[in-house]
Image (cartoon, grey):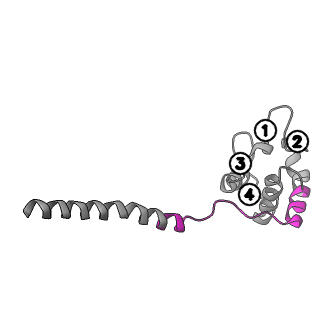
Amino acid sequence: MHTQRCWILAGLAALALSAVPAGAAETAASETPPTQESAPSPALVQEGSELFGQICSHCHGIHMVNPGNSSFDLRKFPHDQRDRFFNSVTHGKGNMPPWGDILKPEEIEAIWAYVRTGGKG
């Protein structure tokens, strides 16, 4: 009788433990925020295209790549790295000067929208 009760308790414990990860995984999956940003509006992309042409194309090229390799190829910039883009534009990085005192956050957002489209705005 004692042995039978131990087996029953062990089975119940195993069942209880096996149910925890499944419930935890479902909870974690439902709490994970989406990682994909929504597509930018055509008007925002157009504004970004104009700003890019005026400000960024001198170093990054008119097609978001400088054939002289002196700047980052923005066609390859990861679309999920918005914060990195904002930080680089605002504070500068490597040979790139900071633009945070010149560009408004809304203008950087527009340029980001243009870069995200791969320059097809």
Q: Earlier in the sequence, mark 3 or mark 1?
A: 1
Point 59% across, 65% down: residue: 33
Return the residue nearer the eye: 26 or 70: 26
Q: Magenta stretch containing residue 33, yes or no? A: yes
Name of the residue lying farthest toward the left: 2
Marks 2 and 1 in Cβ contact (< 8 Å): yes
Q: Return the mark for residue 61.
A: 2
Location of mark 4 (residue): 100
Amino acid on which disc 4 is placed: Gly
Position of residue 62 measured from the top left corner of the image (x, y, whole percent): 91, 44
Position of residue 115 measured from the top left corner of the image (x, y, whole percent): 81, 52
Return the residue nearer the eye: 119 or 52: 119
Q: How many neighbours does mark 1 have within 10 angstroms: few (below 14), some (14-19), or many (20 or more)?
A: some
Q: Which-is-in-front pick, marks 4 and 3?
A: 3
Q: Return the mark for residue 71.
A: 1
Question: Which region of the structure is painted magenta?
Answer: 27-50
Q: Earlier in the sequence, mark 4 or mark 1?
A: 1
Return the residue nearer the eye: 31 or 75: 31
SS at mark 2? loop
- Cα separation, mark 4 vs mark 1, equals 18 Å
